[in-house]
Image (cartoon, rainbow, N blue to C red):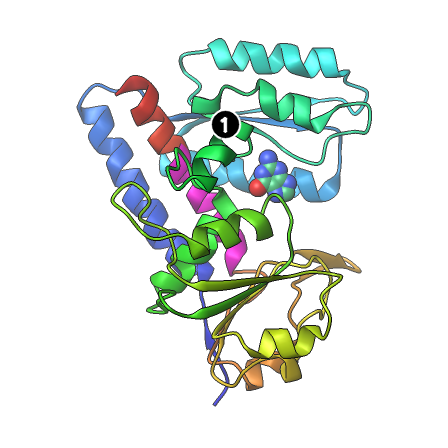
Amino acid sequence: MPAQRLDGKALAATMRSEIASRITERATAGKRPPGLAAVLVGEDPASQQYVKNKHKACQDAGLATAVHRLPVTTSQAELLELVAQLNADPAVHGILVQLPLPKQIDEGAVIRAVSPVKDVDCFHPENVGLLAAGHPRFYPCTPHGVLQLLRRNGTATAGKEVVVVGRSNIVGKPLALMLMQKPTATNPAAGDATVTVAHTRTRDLASVCRRADILIAAAGAPATITAEMVKPGAAVVDVGTNNVEGRWCGDVHEGVWAVAGWVSPVPGGVGPMTITMLLHNTFDAAKLIDG
Ligand code: GUN
């Protein structure tokens, strides 16, 4: 039997309507809508598409949202000036500076300039530290989306062998942290799993992957995970977003669908969940800032 779909599009729609209802409740109580400011520097086509999708999802759910588009020649000082304005703006609860940034700009300096209480990406070192210590202020959007996608489809992570392929700051590293932690009242998404992180220097990647009850593909290269690397019945979450000749594909080869128990499709898997968790964080930031 082919694998069942981990349908991120359907789950995202359900979760976004839950968020929209909570925004309506806040409006009834006289609270302003959660506000997200997205900053896009340059014209990278993938970044433009991501920001467009995030902006539309915010509008549809009733968030106040603005996109600040800056030219590719923007200096670091100009970008830091915009971030300072957004930090000071009471209508802005979340700030998202789309990465990557043009090479004249130091990404770390920009990440550190975003107010930690408005850092809905969870990229600021203060928020990364809180996450690593098991006391998260925000969860990073893609890792949180992956965990929700598993959990809300009935795939528990507690006690499971999970292999994460990829060690990026945006996905692999924070996801591994979240998966290994013990859940608590203030860290409810923690996975309680046994976690292995594999990467480009891992020896015999196939046998490492075959240990996994849950396999997370976040390597950033098409067909990194093939059928013989998957334990029969395993859940496989594809975090890849590779543009191959104008078509989006993930890191998982299509042959995996014949072996796995669950697979998340690309598109329609993790992507819509990442955006949903961004809305969730912006809502939480509004509660944090406005009460
Ligand atoms: N570039 C790729 N993924 C992301 C993300 O989740 N947030 C931001 N700000 N930039 C990205």
In this view, 157 is above or below 118:
below
Q: Position of residue 97 (x, y in %)?
A: 61, 28
Q: Position of residue 255 (x, y in %)?
A: 64, 82
Q: Main secondary structure of the magenta part?
A: helix
Does residue 84 appear left or right of residue 88 in this picture?
right
In this view, 216 is above or below 27:
below
Type of amino acid under label 1: Glu
In this view, 110 is above or below 272:
above
Front in this rendered view, residue 27 or 89:
89
Q: Which residues are magenta?
A: 269-281
Residue drawn 63% across the image and 33% down it: 98
Judged from the image, the quadrant occupied by ligand 1 is: top right
Can you tell which quarter of the image residue 155 is in?
Answer: bottom left
Q: Which residue is mark 1?
A: 126
Magenta-drawn stretch contains 272: yes
Q: Position of residue 90 (x, y in %)?
A: 40, 12
Q: Position of residue 182 (x, y in %)?
A: 34, 53
